[in-house]
Image (cartoon, coloured by chain):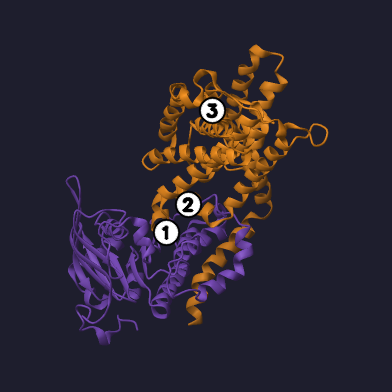
Amino acid sequence: MITGILVIATVWNNVLMGDAGMISFGQAAVMGAGAYGTAIAITRWDTPFVLALGVGVLCGAAVGAIFAIPAQKVESYYLGFVTLAAGLAFEPLVRELSWITGGVRGINLMLPSLKIPLFQSLTPLALIIAAFGVFAVVAQVRLKRSSLGRQMLVAKTSPEAAMTLGVNPGKMRAVAFILTGAMTGLAGGLYAILVGYVGADAFDMDLSFLFFFAVIAGGTGYALGSVLGIGLLYIVPNVLFASLVEYRLLAYGVVIFLIMLLIPDGIVGRLVSIGRFLRGHRDDPKKTSRVGSEVKSMLVDQGERS
Amino acid sequence: MNQSDPSSIELDRPADDVAMAVVIRNVSKKYGAVVALDDVNIDVPEASIHGLVGPNGSGKTTLLNAMNALVKPDHGSVQLLGVDTHRMKPYAVARIGVARTFQTPRVFNELSVWDQVQVGMDTAVDTALGHFWLFEQLEKVKSSWSKSDVSILPHGSQRLLEIIRVVARAPRLLLMDEPAAGLSADEREGLGLLCRRLRDDLEMTIVIVEHDLGLIWRLADRISVMDQGRVVESGTPLELKGRASVENLFTGETNA
């Protein structure tokens, strides 16, 4: 179930990276904010869990909005470093704000009702996590076919061209950060409920890097790639190599290294380009000339008709 | 009607009662010691085609960028479609009805051929133009273009596709930077026909930077010749034909 939560955060990080072209090494802090928001809402204010998750969403969106501020000025890995700094600030910040976060002790929360199996080992919580995981994948696929998604892609590829189309690239970045922040915050809230404990050290840099590398490994921009990426980078080292505790990090490192070296466009990215290559070999020249002449006819036919 | 018609030759400046789509006054821009634009003044009446010609580095593209607000002039004012664009962001200028194509066509590899055009429709200017003939034509190719990858298209088609995208925004003012570069002879002819039809049927105003002087002389209502950031000549194609600065451009072209 932890894997499901990681999938949610990773797919939304993929929206941020693939569709909006932003790099964030601070997504663990976004998730942490969501987790603390939900945990505090449940333990301090006795909020029902749906509302508490909503608090998590708001906290995540707020941190996303903060990240969107430097994103107006800096890009690419420079933005990565700024968000990295924000991510590093998260743990000390949580310790300092101990009056509400519980400091080093963290927060314990009990929500047994969501963990009563409905059927065999299927709990309501598992259903909720699965639903939001599927939602994340569907949302990214749908986003690409929407006006907003196209404008994000244009702003990512050529901010100059985007501006002459009336698209504000800064706004696109902010929307991406806030949207991703909200859903990463939700993932954090689900994490808090699932684990029943929130502590600052769970949301460290390793987690931010996992979200980043899982997107790269699966294929930037491909929603299903993120699912595969988490599978490869989380399940392989933690489950398959679980008995070899000392070699867990080694396995993680080797997997990342091999993927970056051999398939920099990620697993799904590579599969798609192979598919394109095979299809291209069959009908490329014909299709090229047909679409090319259709493009030309858009101009010529217009004039001739008048 | 076509204002390059010989009967209208006596109009050296556009008549005062014609509404202006572009009014550029005393625009200057320096990059360090390099003068990119030097006291440029240009008027373009609505529903006309204006050509900008001149040697490389004469400031043509910088002038287009200043009109798009991608470049902030050091001095002077740019008024487009009756709006003073001073202090406006580039995307705000675009939204008043200004479209732009680039010297290197901006196609987006992650979008299908159709979506290159769809982006233009997504960002359509809010005008009364609405749907015009281009949209009927486009509807017919929608399904085939949706399945096609833009990277399979040759350079010329990508350039035309960018033009179709911005025309699909139904802009009032269209700025094009060397739209004919890399096009075949009949593609250039098609481009010329499209420009005339946009001007005549939709009363669009078009400013074209172009090195194909033959095309510009056939197409434009008025032409400004630029050199070293200045507008050195301005007039109808016929008026300009005999002038020294223009003859130099033509000889420069044949020597190249």
* Chain drawn in orange: A
Three-letter code, disc 1: Leu
- Residue that label 3 marks: A209
* Chain drawn in purple: B
Image-based side of A189 in relation to B22, left or right? right
Give the distance between the C-alpha atoms of the residues marked 1 and 3, in whole angstroms. 35 Å
Q: Residues within 10 Å of mark 3 (few under 14, many from 20)?
A: some
- Residue furthest to the bottom in view is B7
Residue A185, percent across and down?
55, 37
- Residue that label 1 marks: A165
Task: Say above or below: B162 vs B109.
Answer: below
Query: Mark 2 or mark 3: which comes first in sequence?
Result: 2
Say which element carries label 1. loop
> Relative to the observer, which residue lies in front, B189 or B40?
B40
At a point 65% along the width and 42% down the height, the residue shown is A132
Residue B89, percent across and down?
32, 55
Label 1 vs label 3, nearer the camera: 3
Give the distance between the C-alpha atoms of the residues marked 2 and 3, in whole angstroms. 27 Å
Quarter of the image for residue B238 reads bottom left
Cβ atoms under marks 2 and 1 closer than 8 Å: yes
Question: Is there one chain holding both mark 2 and mark 3?
Answer: yes
Quarter of the image for residue A88 reads top left
The disc label shown at residue B1, or none: none
- Residue furthest to the right in view is A120
Three-letter code, disc 2: Val
Image-based side of A105 in relation to B30, left or right? right
Cβ atoms under marks 1 and 3 closer than 8 Å: no
The disc label shown at residue A154, or none: 2
Question: Is there one chain holding both mark 2 and mark 1?
Answer: yes
Q: What quarter of the picture does the N terminus of chain A occupy?
A: top right
